[in-house]
Amino acid sequence: MDNLKITVDFNKEQIIKIFRQLNTAERKSIFAEFKDDIYDFLTDKDVINKMTTIEYNNKINEAEVAYKKGKYLTSDELDKEVETWM
């Protein structure tokens, strides 16, 4: 049983919904146990690792231009947007 692997088929929205239902202690416990796996899943690490430095810098520049034009969401606006996904 040392090599036991459990596969769970959840999408990101389902995981976020479940995570929000937990209390703070439960969230901390789960995150501490699986933080690397959770981070990789939520950030799609394989895609990020394939980005070149030039692509990364272009993304940063695009984000800065968008921010200066007022094209961004506050955290409250983002929370409201996420709620519409569920």
Image (cartoon, rainbow, N blue to C red):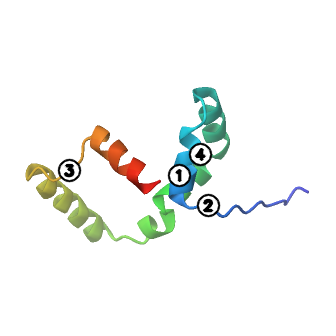
Q: Amino acid at mark 4?
A: Ile
Q: Secondary structure at mark 1?
A: helix
Vertical side of 47 occupied by 64: above or below: above
Quick check: 75 left or right of 25?
left
Residue marked by disc 2: 10
Residue 67 lies, with reference to residue 61, above or below; the image says above
Front in this rendered view, residue 79 or 32: 79
| Image x and y of residue 38, in percent | 58, 51
Earlier residue among tags 1 and 4: 4
Q: Are marks 1 and 3 in contact (CB under 8 Å)?
A: no
User: How far across and how far down the image is residue 49, in percent?
Assistant: 45, 66
Kind of residue at badge 2: Phe
Q: Is residue 40 visible?
A: no
Mark 4, residue position: 18
Residue at the top extreme of this rendering: 25
The answer to which of 36 and 17 lies nearer the viewer is: 17
The amino acid type, in three-letter code, at marker 3 is: Tyr
Q: Residue 42 placed where, x, y %?
A: 50, 56
Return the mark for residue 72: 3
The residue nearer to you, when weighing 10 against 40, is 10
- Residue displayed at 15% across by 53% down: 71
Please identify the quarter of the rendering in which residue 65 is found.
bottom left
The residue wearing badge 1 is 39
Q: How far is mark 1 from mark 2, CA to CA?
A: 15 Å
Residue contact at pointers 2 and 4, CB within 8 angstroms: yes
Three-letter residue code for mark 1: Tyr
Of labels 1 and 3, the one closer to you: 3
Q: Earlier in the sequence, mark 3 or mark 2?
A: 2
Alpha-carbon span between mark 1 and mark 4: 16 Å
